[in-house]
Image (cartoon, helix red, strand yellow):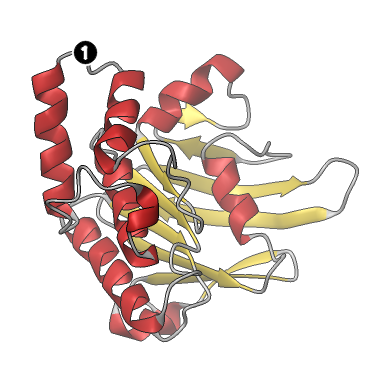
Amino acid sequence: MLIRYKNVSFRHVDDDYVLEGVNLNVDAGDFVYIIGKVGSGKSSLLRTFYGEMEIDSAEEAIVLGRNMTYIKRWEIQPLRREMGIIFQDFKLLTDRTVRGNLDFVLRATGWDNKADREQRIAEVLKAVKMEGVEDKMPHELSGGEQQRIAIARSLLNSPKIILADEPTGNLDPETADQIIGLFNEISAAGTAVVMTTHNLPMLERYPGRVYQCEDQKFIELTELGR
């Protein structure tokens, strides 16, 4: 079990609950969609998974073996190294090449051998079908290509789970379809994917478990699931 949430509730400081009574289990290879209106708590829920938002109360809140209710600050970075986190705006470093972006992450996470880093960069670029762009700058790539590089970056340390927050929000429909198809392939290979999205047509094209954030509740829409 990668994520086990049982009756988890959280809120902004001095504010109403964002979500109450969240129940969610995520295993290796799961493909999970989280849908809902803007402001319904989708992104906030993802932030509780990687320790950026505190949990207010829970019967159980375990992510990759850590108790997120009582997690210490020094435990958060090691937790995030076991995840891939992807955002809508790519967050690539604009002052360096694709190779430089990927190499930066590897060096920051303890890859000291240059040959090993070069090999791993080649592997993840192949996985996202972006071979041959190592020396390009981010601005030379399309939005879809930049998102593929962001996905490649998330795969560098062989994460157990990928958290993707509206990863197709800035992409045209055809490119969005390709990106969600890529996530589907990653999930089928054994890495769990949890993705927030407004792209509802993709739920039928690439089936998975579907949850909705609405009125502070977290509801499983089993009729749309596998």
- Locate residue 28 relative to residue 120 in the image: left or right: right
Q: Please report the residue visible at 41 percent of the width from the left and 57 percent of the height from the top.
A: 194
Q: Is residue 13 visible?
A: yes
- Locate residue 124 relative to residue 146 in the image: left or right: left
Q: Quadrant of residue 110?
A: top left
Q: Please report the residue visible at 52 percent of the width from the left and 42 percent of the height from the top.
A: 49
Q: Quadrant of residue 128?
A: bottom left
Locate the C terminus by quadrant: bottom left
Q: Quadrant of residue 141?
A: bottom left
Residue 224 coordinates in the image, percent (x, y) = 41, 82
What's the amino acid at mark 1?
Asp
Count of numbered labels shown in the rendering: 1
Locate the N terminus by quadrant: top left
Q: Which residue is mark 1?
A: 112
Q: Please report the residue visible at 20 percent of the width from the left and 43 percent of the height from the top.
A: 134
Residue 149 coordinates in the image, percent (x, y) = 30, 51
Residue 100 coordinates in the image, percent (x, y) = 30, 33
The answer to whether 111 is drawn above or below residue 186 in the figure is above
Instruction: Name the one closer to the observer, 164 or 69.
Output: 164
